[in-house]
Amino acid sequence: MKVTKFGGSSLASAAQLEKVLQIVKEDASRKFIVVSAPGKRSSEDIKVTDLLIAYYNTYLNNENTTEITGKIVDRYEAILDELGLDKEILNDIQQGIQKLATLPKQDNPHLFDAFLASGENNNAKLVASFFQQRGLKARYKNPSDLGIIVSDEPGNARILTSSLSKINQFKTTDEILVIPGFFGFTEAGDICTFSRGGSDITGSIVAAGVEADIYENFTDVNGIFVAHPGIIHEPKTIKELTYREMRELAYAGFAVLHDEALMPAYRANIPVVIKNTNNPEHPGTLITTSRTVKHDPVVGIASDQGFASIYISKYLMNRELGFGRRLLQILEELGLSYEHMPSGIDDISIILREEQLTIEIEEQLMERLERELEPDELRITHGLSMLMVVGEGMRQRIGVMADSTAALAFNKINLEMINQGSSEVSIMFGIREDQEKKAIQALYKTFFEVE
Ligand code: ASP
């Protein structure tokens, strides 16, 4: 049995919904359908979730909400009209949207979440009604009835493990259950959403809960590319990769799947496949515990900008007891989290996300490091990009590091830092942001253009 999630672009218009119907119809094991809110129909269009944010702000500022609620209802109505569906469900959707503007504004930490969640909730109702009218035995299922229980962290909820056994009770359903993604309910019964893009998380939780054979995530690309298509023209798609490889790539900016979405499926050992609603015949990208395609040492190359590196060197650092602890304590006391910490005998670098460093924080940080650690050398470099060459296969293959550095050197890319994580799933290079594009192109050529 399969859990199948469709993203916003797969549900943005009647034409897209027809494709979704075909996909669901052609495989009877697709029993759990998780949906996002309608997304963009074109690049200028606005996602329903973003319209709901505008609605929330209008309501909060005591402005007239007629126009914005009209725009939101219109999105659902247009889909129903184009599909030629019975519009009974529209009343329900319209009332639900209007009722949001009667919820209390004071002492209501879940208000924003209630607005946002309505996007997927109404869409699940619409999709269920569409499936029924086209002859499928389908039903809308609210996350609270299904047992999606989450932590009380508005806008950033996490799933509670108690959910899984509750969801498991629906495992043997003979109907198709259409479930809204992106939100759950707290133990006290309040609505709470995951962070943006969180419908992927719902799909993964449901898959884990019902012990699905596979979690299918339908989006608008053929799968995960080996490198960013903005940098490489028509890059190859990855056929298969492991959860760990995916995690590394996602960390460095591969945003096909929500960062937190893999965890429930991973823990339950359920493979995840990324597929294209617009090209369902394409096999997509499979994410599993271990891959069968073993000959490729590198599966992908990713990069992310906005890092700073603090270099600290002190003669005999290795003998100085508590040096690392004091360093980390300074970071902690300034509320700074670090990403990487490569070290040598007498030196250490701290790589952190630059967005955390306001001018004042940076001044305090450098002053405290100087005073409390008394280093021989201390400097900060801004504007770094982290380049990741990812692949479990590199553990068995000699020369991945050599090939990477040779390609970078040949293209005159200066390496500010090299770090190979202890797990040997990736090699990371710190380079200057303005050299990022050239570096990715050089590595792509080395690992993916040779036969
Ligand atoms: N609709 C929500 C968003 O735009 C959640 C999702 O689509 O996954 O963030």
Image (spheres, helix red, strand yellow):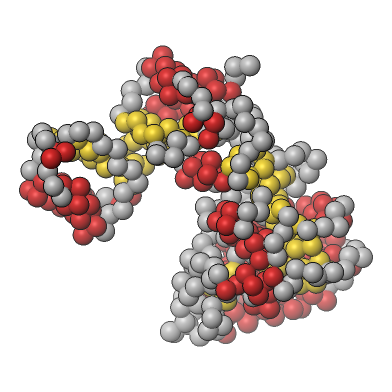
Task: Give me the residue at 47% from left, 45% from top.
Answer: 251
Task: Give me the residue at 27% from left, 50% from top.
Answer: 357
Q: How many marks?
A: 0
Q: Quadrant of residue 340?
A: top left
- Left or right: 398, with 8 as reference point: left
Rendered position, 26 above or below 238: below
Rendered position, 1 above or below 353: below
Question: Where does the C terminus fall, quadrant-wise?
Answer: top right
Question: Could you tell me residue 66's position as x and y percent?
Answer: 62, 75
Question: Where does the N terminus fall, quadrant-wise?
Answer: bottom right
Q: Residue furthest right?
A: 135
- Left or right: 170, with 386 as reference point: right
Q: Quadrant of residue 137?
A: bottom right
- Left or right: 405, with 145 as reference point: left
Depth check: 128 or 352 in front? 352
Question: Could you tell me residue 146's position as x and y percent?
Answer: 68, 74
Question: Could you tell me residue 115's position as x and y percent?
Answer: 57, 73
Rendered position, 41 above or below 138: above
Rendered position, 192 above or below 324: below
Residue 369 seen: no
Task: Give me the residue at 85% from left, 53% from top.
Answer: 27
Depth check: 292 or 314 in front? 292
Question: Could you tell me residue 360's position as x and y percent?
Answer: 19, 53
Task: Give me the residue at 62% from left, 63% from top.
Answer: 205
Depth check: 276 or 163 in front? 163
Residue 248 seen: yes
- Left or right: 450, with 218 as reference point: left
Depth check: 201 or 21 in front? 201
